[in-house]
Structures are given as C-alpha cells and as structure tokens.
Amino acid sequence: MPSREIFWNIPYNFLLYIFAGISVVFLAYCIYRRVKVWRLGKPEDRTSNIGKRIGIFIRTTITDIFGHRRFLSEPYPGIMHFTLFWGFMILLLSAAIDAISHFTNHLLRGTPYLWFSLISDIAGFVLLIGVIMAIYRRYVMKPKRLNTFADDGVVLGVLAAVAVTGYMIEGLRMAATEIIQHPDWAGWSPGGLVFAKAFSGLDTNTILLLHRSFWWFHSVMVIGMICYIGLTFSKFQHIFVSPLNVFFRSFGPLGTPAPIDMDKAEILGVGDIKDFTWKQLLDLDACTNCGRCQDSCPAWATGKPLSPRKLVQDLKVHMLNATNKQEMPPDNLLTLVGKAPTEDEIWACTTCGACQESCPVYVEHIVKIIDLRRNLVLAQNKMPETAQLMLRNMQSRGNPWAGVQAMRLRSDWTNEVGLKVLGDGDQVDTLFWAGCTGALVERNVKATLSLARVLKTAGVDFGVLGDAETCCGDPARRAGYEFQFQMMAEQNLEVFKNHGIKQIITSCPHCFNTLKNEYPKYGGDFKVIHYTQLIADLIQQGKLKLTNKLNSKLTYHDPCYLGRYNGVYQQPRKILQNIPAVKIKEMGRSQNKSFCCGGGGGHMWIEEQPGTTKINQMRIEDVIKTGADTVVTACPYCLQMFEESIEHKDIQDKLKALDLIEIVEATMKQS
Amino acid sequence: MNIIVCVKQVLDPEIPPAKFKIDTETKKVIPPLGVPPVISVFDERAVEAACRLKDKNKGKITVISMGTAKASDVVRHALSMGADDGFVLDDAAFENLDSFGTAYVLSKAIKKIGTYDLVLCGRQAADWGAGEVGSILAEILGIPVVTLACNIEVVDNKLRIKRIVKDGLEVLEAPMPGLVTVSSEIGLPRLPGGLGLMMARRKVIPVWKAQDIGAEASPLDKANVHSEVTSLSIPSRKSQCEMITGATPVEAAVNLASKIVSLM
Amino acid sequence: MDTHKGVLICGEIAKQKLAPVTIELLGIGRKLANELGEDLSILLMGSGTSGLGQEAIAYGADKVYVAEDSLLDNYNSDAYTQVAANLCRKILPSIMLLGHTDIGCDLAPRLNGRLGGGLAMDCLALSIDPSTRFLVSTRPVYGGNAHAAMVTRSARPQMATLRPKTVPPAERNDGRQGQVIVVEDKIDPSALRIKVIERIKEEVEGVKLEDAEVVVSGGRGIGSAQNFAMVKELAHVLGGAVGATRPVCDEGWMPATLQVGQSGKAVSPKLYIAVALSGAMAHITGCLGSKYIVAINKDKDANIFNVASFGIVADYKEVLPALTAKIKELKSI
C-alpha cells in the first residue's frame, strides 16, 4: 500500500512542532502589533452588510486571488505570479496534510497518496519556474516599475532554497527507501526521483545524515522565515495582509470620499497620518510595491512627479514613523505633505481610477489623494492658483468656469431649443440636468442642444432647470473643497425635492457619477442615468432609429467617470454599432484600461505641471494610431480635451472630435 | 489691532453686456434673472487686506455693509475669509443715498462699533464706481486717508502703505487710526478655509436700523442729497466689426497687417 | 448758490509744466465759464508755479492762484487738501474741476468731504444745463455698461473729475490777459499726517501707455507672463505701448501701471489692439476713446467684437507672429 512515514529519519521531530508553534505565535503577535498600527487610524465602517461582503470576497477570491484576473492582463508577470502562487499554495497544503496525517495518525495511503506525491512534486516544479522567472525579471529584465530592495533578494532566495532543498530531502529519502523498496511508487515523485538517482551512489549513512541535515535546514529556514516576516514585515506579509485588504475592499463607487460634518468637524481632511482611517492604513501595508498603478497612471506617463505606488509607499513610511513615536516638530506644523509626498504629486492626480483598476490587492489610492487635498485646501489654504481661481468662481457664481458668465448665462441654451424651464412649484418626473459645462461652454452647448433635440424627437418627457441649476459640485469635491460641494449638494437636493424629481438624465459623466453615487448620502432619492444608457435603451425599444449612413471611421474613447467609475462600457458601443456602414476601431487602451483625457480631478482648470507633456496630447496619439477620422466620446471634458489636442497638433483637417449624441442626431431618421 | 471693513453687495459685473438692461423711469438697473449679486471686487480685496494684517498682527476684523437683508451674504463671505464680526445696515431710510449719505451712515455705524485702528474700503464700488465714500468717510471721522493702496503693513505702530500712482508706486506712512481704500493690485483674495466656513455658517449677523446707530433724519433726507442722477442710459453701441478673414489664421493676420498699416 | 460763482480748476504740474490733463481742463473750463458768464480760475501748487501763470492765462484762465510752498512740490494729500479747501472757502467757486488722475482720485473726494459739495468722478462730458445753470456731469457706471448724468442742485461747489483725453485741449492765445494771485497759506509741516517715504518709479520700456498712439493690450487669454512677449513684440513693431486687463495684473503677469480699464488707465490712442481679451465692460470702458479697436480672440461671441472696428476670430498664438512679421515688412518698405 503506497504510503510514507511522516518524519522518517527525523528523531526529536516534536521539536518541529514546538519551533513552528513558537514562530507562529510570534508571527501572530507581530501581526497583532501591526493591527494596532492600522488602528491608529480613524474608524471606518467596513463590516456592516457582512453577508454581502463575504459573498463578494468569495467571488473576488475565485476570480482575482485564484484566477489572477488582474495579473494575467500582462503575460509574463501574470504567469510568473500564477506559478509562484499556486506552487506555493499547493506545497503549503501538502505540508498541512502531512501535519494533519501525523497528528491524527491517519496516513494517506494508496492511490490518493500517489496522486498527492505527484501533485506536490509538480507544484514544487511550478514554484521553481515562478522563482526563476521572478529572479530573471527583477535582476536581469529590470522593468522600470520595480523597486528592488534587499528583502526581495531574501524572499526569492528563500523560496528557491525551500524548493530545491525540498526536492533534495525527498530525493535523499527516496534514495534510501523508495528506489530500493518500491520503485514503482518512485515515478509518482519525478522531481524527487531525479535527485534520488543523483544521490543513489552514496552510502546509506551519508544519505541518512544528509537527509537529516537538509531536513532540519529546510525546516529551520521556513521557521526562520516566519519569524523574519514577523520582525520585518517583509514582502511575504502580503500573503495574509493582501487577502485581508481584499476582504475589506470598498464595494461602493470609486473615489468617493466620506462627508465632513460642517458643523462639528475637528479634523479637515488628512493632515497627519493618523487622520487616515484604519482601512486606508491597511492599504499601505497591503501594497506589494508591484508598480502596476504607476505604469497605468496618466500623470506619471506624462512626466508628472506623481506615482501612485510611490505615494502609497511614502505614506507607509509616515505610518511606521508614527509608531516609532517620532517627536512632533516644535511648531507642530503638519508635515504629511511636504517632502514625500510633495504638493505637486497630490495635485497632479486626475482621479481617473486606472491605478485602482490595475491594483491586484485593491489598494484605494484616490480617496487618499482627495483626503490630502482637503487638508491642504480647507486647513492650510494651499492650492495651485488655477485651482483657487476655479474654486472662488464656484463660490461666487455657482459654476467653475471663471469669465464665461460675461458671455452667456446659465439658462441661455434653453432658449435655443425652446424648452420649458421649471418654475416655482412645477412638478416633473424626469429632469434633464445640463451641467455647467454643457450649459456655459460654447462647444459643449452644441452637444447639449443636440441631446435636447434627440430627446424631444424620441418623445421623452423632461423638464430643465435653467438657471436654478448650480454646479453638481464635482470639481470642488475632487479639488478638496468639500464644504463648497456639500453646500451645493444640499441646495440642488432641495431643488429636486421641490420639483418632485424622480429621475435625472445627465450628459456629463461627472454629474452622472456625483448625482448617482454621492448625492444619496445627503438625502437624495432619485434614479440617475447617463444619456448613453437612455439612448441605447430607446434604440433597442425601436423608439429611435439610426438610419443615415455615416462614412466615417470612428474610435470611441471611454470617459473615466462613465467607464471605470460606473461600468458603462457597452451602451455607447451598442449605439455606435447601430449606425449603418460605420467602421469602428478600438484603441489599444480602451474600456477599463482607457487612458484618461486629463480633464478629471479638477484638471479642466488646474494647470498641468509646466514642462511636462499634457495628458490629452498623449491620448490623442492613441486616437491617431487607430487611423480613425473621428474620435467619439460621451463626456464634455473629454470632448474639449480632444479638440484642444487636435488643434495643438494642427490636424483638424484629418481628425475631428464629436460627442456621441451629435453622431446619433446626425444619423437619426429625419422626421 | 481693530480693523473695520466696509463692503458692498453689487450686481454681478460679469454679465453679458447684451443682458444689461435699465429702467429709464426709475433710473435703476434691471438685474437679469438667475444672476446672484456678488461682493464688490475691491471690497473683497479690502477684506483680504484686513485678513493679511490680522495674520501678521493679531487683531479683530469687523465687517459692515449697507444694503438689503441679502447683503448678509457678502458679510458672511467676509466672515468665512477671516473676519470676526459682521453687521448689516438695512433701513428704508438708507435707500437711494448718495456718497455723502452712505459715508454718513457708515460713520455712525463705525462710531457705534467703537474703537478702531484702521478702516478699510474698496477704492470704488464695482457698480457705481465713484470712489468717493472712503475719502468722505475719513473726513467725517477726522482721520487721515490714503487711496489706491496695493499693500498695507504696520511698521513701528504706524501704517505703511504702498499706493499706485501713474508711473509706479508711492510708499506712504500714516498714523493710526486711519482709512485706506484698497485697489485690486493688492492681489487675489484668499479662498475661505474650512474653519472660516464653519464659523461663518453659525454666526448671527445682526441688522442695524437707523435708530440703532443713531442716524439722524436730516442727513438721510432725500431733499438734502448732495448729488443726484438725472438720467441713466445705455450708450448706443453699433456693432459694426469688420471681420478680417483668410484661409488660415496666418493669412488673416497678413490681411490685417495691411489694414493696420493703411490706417496709420 | 448765488454766493458761489466761477469755475476753479485744481491744476497739476508735470515736469515743471502744466500737465496735459490740466490744459484739457482749461479748455472745458473756459467753455463752461463762458456759458455761465463767469470767471475761470486755476490753482497751481508747488515751487515755481508763478512762472506758469502766464501759460495758464494763455490757455484761458482769468485768474491764476499760485501756492508756492516747497511742501507742495510733490503731491501730499493733507497739504493739497488744506490749500485747495482754504482757497475754495475764500473764493467760493460754483464749479470745481480736477483731472481723473491718481492725484484727482485722492484729492477730489477729500475736498468734497471737507467742503460738502457734490462730486462726479471720471466724467466723460461736462456741460451747463441752460435752464437751471447747473453743471451736468456724465460719467460711466456699471463698468461702462451705462452712462449716468448727475447734477448737484444746492450743495456747492459742484465738483467733477474729468477723464483725460476725452475733451480737446485748450487753444493757446498768448495775447490773453489775466491775473496771477499769490496764495498765502502757511502749511504747518507737523500737521501733515501722511508722509511720503519713497517713490518707486516703474521702469516702462518704450512708449508710455497714456501717451501712445498705438496700444496693444493682452487679456487673460494670453495665458501666462511669458506669452506676453508676443504682445510686447507687436507693440514694439508698431511703436506703441503695451496694456493689460485687470485679471492679468491681478495674476502678476504685467505690472499694475499697464492696466487699462475701470480701475486702471483710460487710453484713447489712434489704434487699440485687444489680444485674447473677452471685452468685459470694465476693461472696454478704458479704451472706448480709441479711434480704431482691433480684436483678436478665438471666441467669436466675445464682447470685444461688439466694440471693435476690425477683428479676427482665431487663436492669438497663430495670428500674432504673422501679424507682427507682416507689419514689420510693410513698414520697412
């Protein structure tokens, strides 16, 4: 009956349990101390709705942790980590099964034992492949996004040593037992067999001695590693911290900061590391320094100093300093944003969400940045001048477009298409929310008018607010000027209530996101849709037909706040696919990997760092590569950004930018 | 130091000129719908100047505004920037006053407030633009006045003021108490911070009537007004702009160049 | 009312001569005095002003009051107010005129406060109402969106500050006769509360804004201080001066001395080129006196096109270099 004696040739094997026990207790203690560090942060509710959370965690575990969904978009590092992970997990499982067998004295026997041996051997081989790929990548390929420290060498070295010595131990045991006694079992441990054959020439006593030595060496190394993890919180900690972070991940909307109580708040945003919540501090440890966020960040790609990874690692240093009870500087100046991270880094972010989309362990970067901005703006009065200009205009005129009121008023657009503006006491179910940009900026007004005409033609019954619309507050909130946002939200919600609004159609994804995901916290109860969702529905119901041919080659740019923030990828495409004879070419970076236009996070107004490439100038290259003659988008900021970059490259004769609704109107049946 | 700032709420200067309408009968502007009034630009700079002085010298800023009840909005804005107290002067008797009348009302309010080291005003109101009230107020109070300030500091317990003149700057020294009118060159006003906004939200802004400040009837009597408006009109602006065109902006520029040289 | 007679001008001295705005005031003052059938007087303050007496008479003054105190050599708010107010109380003019300059902006309201008359600032036109014999002052309000006509019925003196370059200068007639009267007004230096510590001259390269035949102004659309180089280049090629709007000066891209508009300078050159500025009334009010206004703006709905004589709708960055180059070429032919 195939089987194997656990702890063969290892007297005093109980010592292993003692050492293991001590090291695990030690690790547990170290983790406990680390948990106390995270709990230096403010409270945050991530446990209500625990049933839903567990469900999502199970799903995420299957797709992301087991399935490595976010890793495998890049083949080499994806396969590399897949092999490391599964090799390691299976070997860990094997060791656990061994321990259980030994404890319960219920050894694996027969065919199950043979399969167990084979799978373990394969796992070891898979692990070794992963380790070799990793060593090659980190030390030979040296990709830009990897920062290499001594710990990385230790981790990879230990993994390699554990795998190799594992085979050696197996080989030595087999050389002394299986090869001689049960050669038919030996084939089920191919790795061990190779080593067994190598050792078979040695005499038995040497084999036994080598076996015992390597066995203890292997065990002490592993136990030592466990203690090492506890002491240094080495990269290995991601084994338990990252799944923990995934468990506590936000399943709310992307990038939504918490409200600040305008009447009672004592801390405004984050000025000290302990102003972050415990979950935000947990993030800092969950980060494995992989750099995928950096690689996907449009600010970093265009030369700004912001790297989401660096930000997280810098904040981690602050967190660790806080526990070392560093002396506060004598004048108690807030020092969190200063040298690392710098103000320039904080302001460079466009809140596009590419970082969070790419992070395999679900670190949440955006809210941290907004929290830091809040403290800079609300408590320290520090912000770029272009931000200040925009925010002052928000305050005095209720919209971010400084200077534009000299040319048109908020309600002017409604006259051009003959709409009824809601008056005092008027009740209407559906509101078309034009947004500041759509009502005030010349180019975007064209798209607003187009949408209004299309909705009218399709027989949609809606009202508009005209000058009773004040900005949804998104630019103020992303720029950290939270109070202005809250006051505007309260004001707008009052208006919605007075008119009995049940549904809101938006043309701007920023309005869409803010009204849909952020207003409910202040007492909003209405449905919010983006026009692409409505138009797609109307086309499907046959209420809108796109019949006119369009001899264009189009490419569609996914706006960040429509795509990554709200998952609306398919409806705009469905609309475009309904156009007869149209040719559509996707950009390389599209859908959830779409590259930001550079307009979010307040950057329609906040100047990008001089001397760097503008983000929209980088994105237009993606458009040009498709060979399209028209870039289509469904966001007023994206539209402006594309027109600006087309003008900058002086290719207006070859490429034009259009809002999706303008194409819908152009291809609609003219009634 | 104690600073008093006088602020005025005005029609938003940034409205499209095409929307600017007046009632020639009442000689008043008809504000377009949906455009809220704002704090006069130069008065906001005066508040900023006061806040900068308070940052450096410790003190108290009191803001007063003569206007309707809505004027409390601009007082609240000043509070959120860093002022400590605010009052609105609202009385039917204060309507349609000229610069003298306005200065008189402000002076009574200032006397009620009590001690002060500095009174700040904008150099002119963003709507009427006369630029008289500050100086008249100083004459009434009997204190020295410096106009068109772009920088104010306190040095050796005296005011040190930089003043805009035709071809540069003057640096002046004046004793306290004094009055200074502030010009926009002082720089951008600060964005109200979190604490300022929170404090301003809670603050009660009292409204003072004529009797509260001891304003007498005679100076407010419309019959005693010093200057009055006999007509208000919109000058005719015939829009006859000849657009210079070209296939490209460069070509248009070349055409314009010829035009310009022919005119000179 | 009948106690007050005559027109009194508070004159300004520039480089030991009558300032241009003072000569304009003498022109309009003479006209007003003639309509009233009364005298035109002028007050000149500072050392050596008696030497200018004949000149002032040649330009139309009947009486020239000179206050030759060295403390009046440079503008001093307290001193000037004291001398002018005392003279006013002595000779009781019906009308008092000043130029709308940094001196006038300071002096006129103070005098008004001290004397109790009525004042209209930054006037574009002055006239006498034939039926009432009141001074009617027309001034821009609401950033220039409207004009207000103002009178002072009973309070005296009726005061006004006149915007420079809105009326023609007086004609010189050296044969005119008049009186030069010395004003004995002792100024106690210790009573001067406001002291001038320093005067900092802003070095302006090239032509001065107020005197220039050509002004090229840039607005917020220029985008940055560096980009103003293009504006300066065009001004240089045309032999003109550079101007700026208030937001530009607030941002610090250009010095405040170059601000054109409601709170800056009013200019009336032959040619005013407005580059990348929207044409807010508060700015336009400062350049409406120009003979030709040319606008370059990428927004076809910008208000500046409503007051311009010629315009190009395009990005200034594409227009200015070509414009400058072509003008240079044409001028060198």
Image (cartoon, coloured by chain):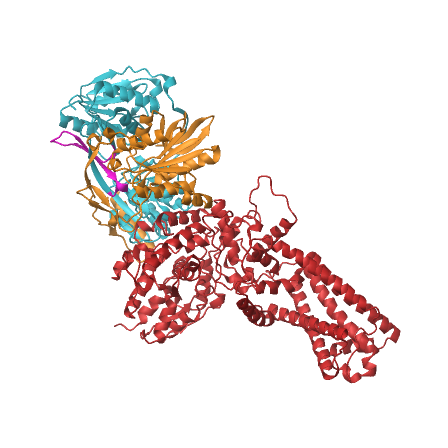
Chain colours: A red, B orange, C cyan
Q: Position of B77 compared to A184: left or right?
A: left
Instruction: Name the image quarter holding residue B131.
Output: top left
Q: Position of residue A191 (x, y in %)?
A: 74, 76
Camera-side residue: C144 or C299?
Answer: C144
Camera-side residue: C240 or A479?
Answer: A479
Q: Position of C95 compared to A27: left or right?
A: left
Q: Position of residue C168 (x, y in %)?
A: 21, 33
Above or below, comparing residue C263 to residue A235 in the picture: above
The stretch drawn in magenta includes residue C137: yes
User: Looking at the image, can residue A525 be seen?
Assistant: yes
Camera-side residue: C276 or C51?
Answer: C276
Quarter of the image where the C terminus of chain C is located: top left
Camera-side residue: C117 or C287?
Answer: C117
Q: Position of residue A395 (x, y in %)?
A: 38, 48
- Numbered circles on residues, count: 0
Residue lying farthest to the left in this orientation: C131
Instruction: Name the image quarter holding residue C162.
Output: top left
Residue range in magenta is C120-145
User: Looking at the image, can residue A590 be seen?
Assistant: no
Q: Position of A176 compared to B60: left or right?
A: right
Quarter of the image where the N terminus of chain C is located: top left
Q: Position of residue B152 (x, y in %)?
A: 42, 32
Q: Position of A615 compared to A240: left or right?
A: left
The residue under the point 58% across, 50% down is A274
The stretch drawn in magenta includes residue B193: no
Residue lying farthest to the front in this orientation: B211
